[in-house]
Image: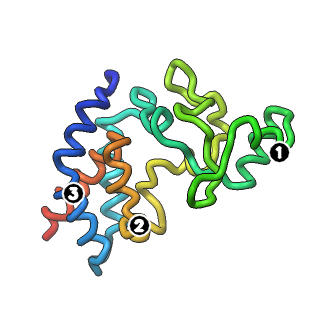
Amino acid sequence: MAEINVKNYRRRALRKKKDLSKFMRELGKSTKKGLLKTAIEVDKEVWKEVSCTNCANCCKTMTPTYTKKDVNRIAAHFKMSYDEFYKKWLKKDSNKDIVNKTTPCQFLGKDNLCTIYAIRPVDCAEFPHFVRKDFKYQVQEKTYSNNMVHCPATLVFVEKLKEAIEADL
């Protein structure tokens, strides 16, 4: 896959954000059965078009939320204490979540690959959060609507999800 032109996806996301966000709000209120199954099918299609390692915009412009377990695991990998690791790399944001002090992520390599991939935070491992048991909750929490401008895969996911659901009506 070729390198992703993030600017083009961002422009497309901004152009479509109002319509796609409205669709997602309505989907969050829907009682339609089989949404997770549809999301699973759409997820497979997204990755035919978008490759995370050709993008890494999430790592360049966003920060994961770390759990205490994440911090302990990663700190141990670097033979650091929780406090040493936290002081060097992390902070609490306005929501009191543990996040990186800076972006891009300190663990993003020049090749767009995560240098701690095997032990990365759970938030990174689950991103962009497409296929989850709490899929409907993620829709209601505006996770996808918020991530569309940062993540080309999320934009494509929401576009394809909208197409799939409208075709099913």
| Residue 43, percent from left and from top | 35, 50
**Disc 1 residue type (three-letter):** Asp
Please identify the residue farthest to the front as the structure is shown.
Answer: 94
Q: Please indicate whether residue 97 sits to the left or right of residue 103 in the image.
A: right
Residue at 53 percent across and 34 percent down: it is 103
Disc on the earlier residue, 3 or 1 = 3
Q: From the viewer's perspective, is residue 125 above or below residue 131?
A: above
Residue at 27 percent across and 53 percent down: it is 158
Disc on the earlier residue, 2 or 1 = 1
The residues bearing labels 3 and 2 have C-alpha atoms spaced at a distance of: 14 Å
Q: Please indicate whether residue 82 sits to the left or right of residue 102 in the image.
A: right
Q: From the viewer's perspective, is residue 54 above or below residue 123?
A: above
Residue carrying label 2: 141
Of residues 133 and 17, the one nearer the viewer is 17
Residue carrying label 3: 20
Of residues 87 and 123, the one nearer the viewer is 87
Check contact, mark 2 vs mark 1: CB within 8 A: no
**Disc 2 residue type (three-letter):** Glu
**Disc 3 residue type (three-letter):** Leu
The N terminus lies in quadrant = top left
Q: From the viewer's perspective, is residue 105 above or below residue 23?
A: above
Residue carrying label 1: 83
